[in-house]
Amino acid sequence: MRIHLVALRAMLLATVVLGLGYTLLITGVGQLVLPAQANGSLLERDGEVVGSSLIGQSFEGATEYFQSRPSAAGDGYDAGASSGSNLGPENPDLVAAIEERRAAIAAFEGVDPAAVPVDALTASASGLDPHISPAYALLQVDRVAEARGLDPAAVRELVDRTMQGPDLAEARVNVLELNLELDGLEG
């Protein structure tokens, strides 16, 4: 019986120290050293949280905004269902979806289907990627400028200004941050 009590006390002590103490320590260090990242890299507009710089959002159909890449996460950008489609490159369903997206984007942007970049056609591995390529952002400049009554050169400059990288990854544009800057450009 004595051995069982010692084992129980050791388990309770380990649970408190490792389960509670370690968690509180790491949370405190995260809040002290990287508070924005520890709180989800939230973006605010007029004191209201509008999203995270780490998770994409859909702007589908809104001609006055830059469009995100497709999402395979749940019903689209569902952080609770993060995943890719798991369809291989020769899967007929994926090929059909890509061709459908290519035609829809080409019509929406008023460009040749061959001009549509690959990131506009395929979802990221997580389905939550908040970034698009500079090529996809620049493809959308004329449509966004026309919808907002802005000079395309000013919108193109905004894309260049919000572009990140290249560093360890290719150059990219965060769609939510770009759209928030776009709203600020008008305001």
Image (spheres, rainbow, N blue to C red):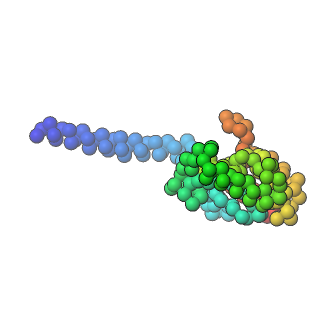
- Is residue 156 something one can see in this rendering? yes
Q: Quadrant of residue 21?
A: top left
Q: Residue at x 79, y 52 (%)?
A: 113
Quarter in which the C terminus is drawn:
bottom right
What is the x, y in percent for residue 101? 70, 56
Q: Is residue 91 shown above or below 168?
A: below
Q: Decide if residue 61 is on the left or right side of residue 83.
A: right
What is the x, y in percent for residue 2? 12, 38
Q: Residue at x 73, y 54 (%)?
A: 102
Q: Residue at x 77, y 63 (%)?
A: 64
How many marks the image carries: the answer is 0
Query: Along the line of sight, which residue is nearer the eye, 84 or 158?
Result: 84
Q: Decide if residue 145 is on the left or right side of residue 38.
A: right
Q: Looking at this view, name the residue that lies furthest to the left.
A: 1
Quarter in which the N terminus is drawn:
top left
Query: Along the line of sight, which residue is nearer the eye, 29 or 157?
Result: 157
What is the x, y in percent for residue 120? 71, 51
What is the x, y in percent for residue 179? 73, 57
- Is residue 175 something one can see in this rendering? no
Query: Along the line of sight, which residue is nearer the eye, 181 or 13?
Result: 181
Q: Quadrant of residue 79?
A: bottom right
